[in-house]
Image: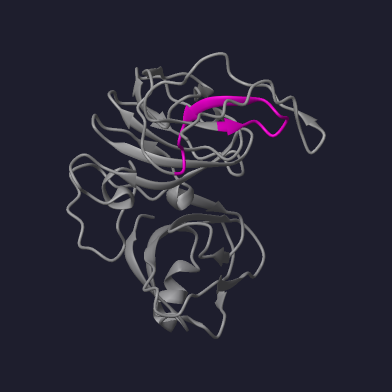
Amino acid sequence: MASTLAVDKIKTLSGVAIGWPDADGAANTILGTDGLGQLSFRADSAGEVSKGADIASADPLVITTGANYFICTGTTGFNDMTVAANRHFYLEFSGILTMTHNAGVLDLPSGLPIATAVGDVGEFYSTAANVVTCVNYTRADGTAIVASNLTNTAITTTDQSWTGSQRATHVANTDAQFDLNTGQNFIMSISSGTPVLTFSNRVAGSGQSGFIKFVNGGTVLSAHGNTKIDANFLATINAVGTYLISYFCDGTDVWLTTSAIYS
């Protein structure tokens, strides 16, 4: 004999009161609990992708519930999100904006900002409430995110063709001690004493080179053992005057030569 068993008004499970949804959920949703006994229908964030309503760009960007794929509209940049823990979701960008890396809050690939393009898609996961990691970012044109997306960034292993001016900001020195980690070009202005030309942080294989503008107001220089300078050249720049000196570091030594004598 066929029969149908209907179960109604189950109120507890292992002592926990259960709250049932009032009606059936939308198509392609699943029944889940919030961990406090309340059941509701929601998108299956671990499985099928479900598109939600568009999200207007804002700072913070608010990630809504009920779906896991959203179109992010607008051009307002952001560096954090308002989102529940353990959400796996996707954002497709319909405008140009900047997502800024915010360590421990919004972690982006390479720790650098991402300038979005129309059609780009980012994949995100929230490890805690409002703590989000971008686990994948796909550009609409298929180019790599680090190579193409970051402004003012050179690819150091690739030949570069510069279309804009390139400048190395000079470092002002009041002595003859040069730290090659602080800059490429230097201005040295000394009026007294007997300073020793010394270069620190000589990195092997770096091939660092640059210029030193030396304003000698009445000092007599000598050279450290790793500073290679012709004796006649050293005698020349030890006279009061202004000189432009070029240098090249081979990683062990720094080689100096005069480029111009002004006075």
In-front residue for pair 25/52: 25
Between 143 and 85, the residue placed more toward the observer is: 85
**Left or right, 165 with reference to 193:** left
**Could you say where residue 231 lies in the image, as x and y percent from the top left?**
44, 83
Magenta segment boundaries in residue numbering: 32-46
Residue 8 x/y as whole percent: 64, 22
Instruction: Give the residue displayed 38% in from the left and 48% down from the top.
Output: 136
Q: Which quarter of the figure is the C terminus placed in?
A: bottom left
Confirm whether the magenta stretch covers residue 220: no
Q: Quadrant of residue 237?
A: bottom left
Residue lying farthest top?
22
263 and 123: which is toward the camera: 123
Residue 168 percent location from the top left of the image: 38, 50
The residue lying at 31 percent from left, 37 percent from top is 121
Quadrant location of residue 44? top left
Q: Is residue 212 above or below residue 104?
A: below
**Outermost residue toward the front in this view:** 1
At 55% from the left edge and 72% from the top edge, which residue is drawn?
A: 201
Q: Residue at x 50, y 68 (%)?
A: 238
